[in-house]
Image (cartoon, rainbow, N blue to C red):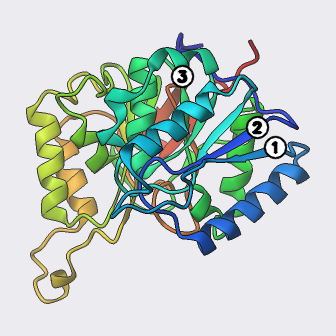
């Protein structure tokens, strides 16, 4: 088992902290997602005590409240002495502004599992690099109402300390075959790129990288991947799996067939690394699919069969 700190398994009656450390939350989508999440937890015998953040529905421009309020909410969630899980209501933007003001010792002591993705990638990476804490790249609350039952069930399996079934590509295909093992680093491409040059960029040497993106046109994806490569950030990466590229294709491609798709850009840029690589895995921003991925736990990437096999639990009893 990899040596990072692991959160303990989630149990009935523990605290479920609902936080919005990035963008403002749509109340209707949140309430639908919260209702389904609580129902699923109760059905699984994990009925929680809900702890909504004080600024959960705050709005300040494109943030869920002022920086200081979002920092305070995270401090309150991780400062709670009771065990539990910290679940992001949505992504958006805002975490990179406040990471330097978080206390890694507080997060390390609490050992609470963080659940989220998209902009929450920044918090997962910060927890991994600064607090030595593994977490869960998984659905935010506003995504849960439309999420495939298979993905929600797998999320709860991770939190219970179990190991879900392998993740298999649904479309896309094999770019480079081969099989490798190592800790998994799942991330949104643009958020990961924004961490270059900060103390919060994860060491990717001998790691397996899982990338997804939303709303970035192919030339911007090319620019982000090129920066990662040129900065040496991908040096030593053992393998890559590419997830959903939601809304990333250039609409002008219909008139100009010479414009590459987002997947073709990933294939061309990352294919040059010559490491096991496949595309089309069902995680990311599609409303109905976002398979949860453990940030920091060991996996086996079997590119020949376009499959990611999980080798150990994320949540482990102390």
Q: Which mark is residue 301?
A: none
What residue lies at 17% left-to-right and 48% top-to-bottom?
224
- Which quarter of the rendered picture does the N terminus lie within? top right
- Which quarter of the rendered picture does the C terminus lie within? top right
**In which quarter of the view is residue 61 placed?**
bottom left
Question: Is the residue marked by circle 1 packed among few (<14), some (14-19), or many (20+) residues within 10 Å?
Answer: some
Mark 2, secondary structure of its residue: strand
Question: Is the residue marked by circle 2 packed among few (<14), some (14-19), or many (20+) residues within 10 Å?
Answer: many
Regarding residue 294, the answer to whether it shows in the image is no
What residue lies at 17% left-to-right and 51% top-to-bottom?
268
What residue lies at 42% left-to-right and 51% top-to-bottom?
22
Q: Is residue 113 above or below residue 260?
A: above
**In which quarter of the view is residue 109 placed?**
top right
Q: Would you say 268 lies left or right of 89 here?
A: left
2 and 1 marks in contact (CB < 8 Å): yes
Q: CA distance from mark 2 to mark 1?
A: 5 Å
Mark 1, secondary structure of its residue: strand
Q: Which mark is residue 107?
A: 3
Residue denoted by label 2: 15
Q: Which mark is residue 49?
A: 1
Indicate the position of residue 177 as horizontal and vertical percent values.
36, 39
Q: Would you say 255 lies left or right of 131 here?
A: left
């Amino acid at each position: 088992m990899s040596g990072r700190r692991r959160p303990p398994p989630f149990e009935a009656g523990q605290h479920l902290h609902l936080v919005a450390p990035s963008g403002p939350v749509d109340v209707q989508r949140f309430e639908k997602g919260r209702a389904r999440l609580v129902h699923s937890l109760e059905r699984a015998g994990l009925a929680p005590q809900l702890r909504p953040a004080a600024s959960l529905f705050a709005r300040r421009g494109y943030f869920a409240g002022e920086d200081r309020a979002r920092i305070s909410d995270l401090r309150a969630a991780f400062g709670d002495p009771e065990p539990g899980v910290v679940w992001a209501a949505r992504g958006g933007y805002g975490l990179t502004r406040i990471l330097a003001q978080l206390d890694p010792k507080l997060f390390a002591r609490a050992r609470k599992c963080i659940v989220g993705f998209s902009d929450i990638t920044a918090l997962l990476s910060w927890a991994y690099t600064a607090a030595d804490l593994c977490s869960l790249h998984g659905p935010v609350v506003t995504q849960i109402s439309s999420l495939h039952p298979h993905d929600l069930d797998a999320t709860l399996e991770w939190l219970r300390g179990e190991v879900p079934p392998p993740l298999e590509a649904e479309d896309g295909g094999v770019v480079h075959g081969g099989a490798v093992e190592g800790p998994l680093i799942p991330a949104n491409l643009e958020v990961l790129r924004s961490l270059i040059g900060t103390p919060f960029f994860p060491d990717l040497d001998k790691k397996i990288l899982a990338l997804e993106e939303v709303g970035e046109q192919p030339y911007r994806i090319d620019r982000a991947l090129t920066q990662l490569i040129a900065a040496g950030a991908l040096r030593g990466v053992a393998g890559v799996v590419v997830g959903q590229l939601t809304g990333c294709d250039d609409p002008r491609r219909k008139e100009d067939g010479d414009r590459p798709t987002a997947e073709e850009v990933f294939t061309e840029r990352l294919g040059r690394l010559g490491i096991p690589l496949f595309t089309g895995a069902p995680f990311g921003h599609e409303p109905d699919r976002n398979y949860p991925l453990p940030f920091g736990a060991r996996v086996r990437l079997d590119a020949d069969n376009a499959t990611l096999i999980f080798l150990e639990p994320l949540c482990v009893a102390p």
